[in-house]
Image (spheres, rainbow, N blue to C red):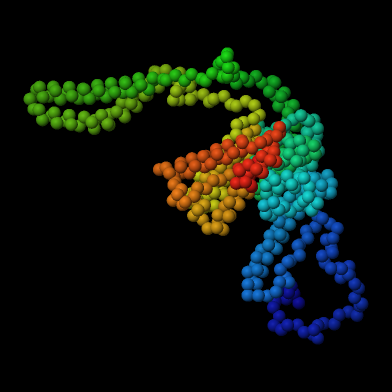
Amino acid sequence: MGIGSYFKASSKPEQPAAAPPRAHKPKQPSAASEKPPSDRFVGNDMELQAPTPRFSSRPQSVSGRSTKSAASSMFLDDIKHEVMVNYLYQQQCSHLWVSDGSGEIEGVLLRKHRGQYMACPPQLGSSPFAQAAAALNVQCAMTVNSRVIKTFLQWSPDAVDVPLMNGLRVQILPTIEDLTRARKHQFAAFVASEGLLIVWDDDALHLIPRAKAIESELMELVWKAGSEEEEEGGEKRDPNVAEVEIDEESGEIIPERRPVHLMNTWLVTFTLILVTVALGAAWRSLALQIAVDGNYVRLALISLFPIQVFFTLFFAQVIIGCLAQIFGPIRQLTINSKFYSARPPPRLQGNILPHVTIQCPVYKEGLAGVIVPTVKSIKQAMSTYELQGGSANMFVNDDGLQLLSDEERRTRIEFYADNSIGWVARPKHGEDGFIRGGKFKKASNMNYGLMVSCKVEEKLLAINRDARGEPSRLGRWQHPCWRLYPHYRL
């Protein structure tokens, strides 16, 4: 017998009677035979426990195949999410990012459906962290408990953000309940009361690398802070000074005066003079030849005057331009004029940058082929901008929802909701008297979306609010805007 015999198919099924005799030794009961196999995982939250299948006892019927297929898909989806959340928790424990396994505030959350999360440890599902993550509608979230983070937060109790490399900053929240109002596209937030770092992402596999990158950048920034100051003190650098004029009455910056430069006007003038001189010399030659022999047929060459101007103008302009670059002034290339900016405007100073709304018109573009990659790219830019101190959101004007089936329309709307994207969809042209006006459909689509957003903003401004800016209970539930848009989060 060799190892190849294990892979050969037997020609006959083995009979119980033909089984080889075993040694006459009493069979000892093993630990595994005393209890069911599933009992091996009892008392260990770290082990993966497969959920009990809920479709094995269903009666057979004609439609049982589709029912079993749907139940099997749900069963596999549960296994997939449970494997991932246990893997993330295992990685969290291996990096020593968990102080205790109680699950009261530390752990991993993974979204299965909207508002439904799988937690590890399971006790984390009823914690304030899980409620805040559900309100923020993140795909996956994890806490990071590190001595580096605790030390930094203890030494900077009044800080509102944590600086990172390249001028990026991560927000600091007072409590875990304030996570619902965090800047979502920063994908991270420090909680001062708990001394924790909370990271979230749209892809569960990117969660651990994001947490490691933030921790390493924070450590690198703290370690190199003193050495960089000593190096900068030894080198003298030219200060970046921008001269501005301040209005004495209002105290605001006076806009920069941008004069109109006439350099190009002079160049065009000299170019036309050169073309006129060249063509005049040609006509002078024709006049001399006619005066000699008296043949006026040569005057027919005057009809080529427009063609000669067309070909001569380019070469004359090149000659004048080269001479101007050699002998002419160049100061106009270093100052700002009405139609030319040689110097960039001064950068915005401060930790707060203006809010930016990214408006995207959509018509027949597909969800998987166009919209998803575009949103993914835009969210990366939004994340960088929010880490720099700004805030941004997306506003989609979808004119193609009426062309989709009910299933595709529901899928697209759920995608917008999962990515916190506001959207407006116009009705069909001619439906219930609605007219899609405008010659350019994308422009009219975007204008209609802006009109709707402005009206919604007016309704929101009319809601009664308390001192913190929170809508009062009376103003929230009795306002027509809330009745029209009950899913809108104020």
Q: Residue at x 55, y 54 (%)?
A: 409
Pick the front one: 419 or 15: 419
Taking the image as shown, residue 478 lies to the left or right of residue 340, namely: right
The answer to whether residue 101 is left or right of residue 258 is right
Q: Position of residue 52 (x, y in %)?
A: 76, 65
Direction from residue 141 to residue 31 in the image, left or right? right
Which of 419/153 is in front? 419
Q: Above or below — where is 33 with respect to 146?
A: below
**432 or 371, nearer to the observer:** 432
Image quadrant for the N terminus? bottom right
Coordinates of residue 342 in the picture (x, y in percent): 49, 24
**Residue 434 screen position, x and y as percent:** 46, 48
Q: Is residue 214 visible?
A: no
Furthest residue to the top? 248
Does 182 sit above or below residue 267?
below
Q: Residue at x 54, y 46 (%)?
A: 424
